[in-house]
Every structure is written in structure tokens, then in C-alpha cells.
Amino acid sequence: MSALAETTVPPEGVAPTSGRNLPLDTRFTLGAEITPQQWAFLDENGFLIFDQVASADECAGILAAADAQAAKWIAAGTKKVYGIPLFRGRGVDGEEFIARQPFNSVFSDYIRDFVHDDRFQPIRDLIGKNTRVGDQEKDGVVLNRYLNVPGSAYPRLGWHTDGLRDIVYMRMPKRMLNVGLHFDRITREDGGLRLIPGSHKQGVKGFLFGKAYFMDHREDPNEVMVETKPGDLTIHDGRLWHRVEKSQHTGQRSLRRSMYLPYLTDEYQPKDENSRTPPYHHIGALVRRFKQLRFK
């Protein structure tokens, strides 16, 4: 699951109607503010795609910093960071490989400076007043690496909504946003993010029982494949049904990387070396173990 942020409704006086009939593959430009058209598209479909918000050099710098930290954790045998598990599996040559890496901005000044950059102020304004970057909260800034090789911990991710963590804590899912930066050119054959537009408006029954959380990988007739280029920024409502499809390629060609930014508005709750593992990560570990045994 990904870092989340609570979002507001459109600002007072904005009548977001002009974006409701746009094609689902519409790519927007991130400007000084979120436009009424962008508000309308997000409200109707539950997601937005912003074209190449980060440069090639910035993408390379972020990946280099994250890879260097991953190498340190592998060498040290680190299993958890601030209570959050590292998803460890095997890489292209059978080496140890971290597929999900939390708290990247805590351990890299470069990544921390990037996620706090002023260009993201419209995104923070979209989320709500007094929005902050949760560098050391929740799971922090998370980097995902999907790889289709034997022993991979993360070749794909089944259908889910990010509001599951609210259910675990015995509360109804809030309206949330998932903000992701993408590092690779991804087309349909490369796997990648699948969304069901409008599913963020489903009722409680659909939210709880619409699909088998994380176990169901089947294609849905209403899903949309989100094609990305390096530097693209995507936003989707946490209540939206989504999944990550496995690449049709194997080895290095199958690698897909994305980073999720935790923009938060709720009570400040930093984590440290003594933090306990949240219940939803224990559940996730059981699911992954079950799938490993099932397909062994």
C-alpha cells in the first residue's frame, strides 16, 4: 500500500464541469494551481496524470540516492525501518533486492529537497490547508520497484483500495489522495498501474467486497491502463480500485519504478527506531506468504 493524503473538495466558487467529458487518457500540465477542469476530471474519474513534472536528471538523482540506501540496508541485513518492513526478494541475477523501500527522504537530502520543492505547492493545496510532507510519518516517501524474475517480492500487486488501512483501524475510509512519481516509460506490455475510473464513488458494499483484496489480479472490463513517461506525476483517490499488472517482459526489461509522496493534514505522528509495525503490514506479510506457498 502507498502513502496517502487527505484531500479537500473543490474550492468555494469553483464549478468543476469542463473536465467531465475529457478522454480518460488525458495528460495535464502542472501549473501554478489546479484548474477547474482538472478538479472536474479528478472528481469524476478519481485520478489525474501530470506530464513529466520531474526532469530526466532529477529522476536519475532520485534513483541513485534510493539505490545507494538500499545497498546499505542489504549489506546491514536490515529488515525494517521505523517499524515498516522492507519488501526483500531477488533481483535479476538472484541477488538480494529491495522491492518496497520506505522513508527515502529521511536518508537522502536530495530526495527530501525534491519532495519539498515549490512546484508541488498546487498538489499540496489540492489536498488541503496546512498540508505537510510526511517524511517520517506513515511509511514516509516510498519507492516501489516491480521486477518480473524468479524470487521477486513484487512482480505485481492485486486489486485493492488504499482505504483498507482505515478499515483495519475500524473506521470508514476518508477521501484520500495517492500521489506518485514515475521513473520509466511504461506501456501496456510493461504492466503498470490499472485503475477503475469512478470506483471511488462506490458504496460500502462495493468497497469491502467488490474484489478479493490483493488476491485478485484479473483484468476488469472497466479498467484503464495508465501509461507513464519518466517524470510523470499521477494522483488517484485512495478509495479507487487499482492494481499493478505484471510486465510481459522478464529480467531488467521488466523493471518498473515509482515513488509515492505522503502529503498529510492530520495529527503529526512521527516514527523512529522504536516504532511498532502497523497491523496492515502484518496482514500484508501474511498475504504475501500465502501467495508464495500457493505458487511454490
Image (cartoon, rainbow, N blue to C red):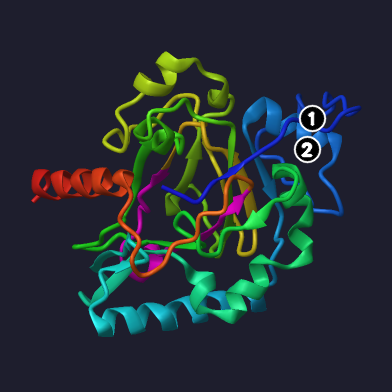
Residue 105 appears in the rendering: yes
Amino acid type of the residue tagged 1 in the rendering: Gly
Name the residue located 25 percent from the left edge and 69 percent from the top edge: 79
Instruction: Identify the residue position indicated by label 1 in the image.
Output: 19
- The image position of residue 129, as x and y in percent, is 75, 45
Q: Amino acid at mark 2?
A: Gln
Using residue 60 as the reference point, say whether residue 252 is left or right of it: left
Give the mark nearest the N terminus, 2 or 1: 1
* Residue situated in front as seen by the camera: 70 or 157: 70
Vertical arrangement, residue 202 with respect to residue 166, above or below: above
Q: Is residue 23 in view from this perspective?
A: no
Q: Residues within 10 Å of mark 1 (few under 14, many from 20)?
A: some
Q: Horizontal placement of 202 versus 91: left or right?
A: right
Residue 134: % across, % down? 57, 58
Range shown magenta:
244-264
What residue is shown at x 26% (from left), y 66% (from top)? 88
Seen in the picture, residue 296 relative to 185 is either above or below; the reply is: above
- Please report contact status of discs 2 and 1: CB closer than 8 Å, yes or no: yes
Question: Viewer-proximal residue, 152 or 87?
Answer: 87
Q: At 49% across and 31% down in the image, what residue appears?
A: 223
- Which mark is drawn over residue 38? 2
Residue 108, percent from left and from top: 53, 79
Residue 259 % position (x, y): 52, 61
Q: Residue at x 85, y 34 (%)?
A: 36
* Mark 2: secondary structure: helix
Total count of labels: 2
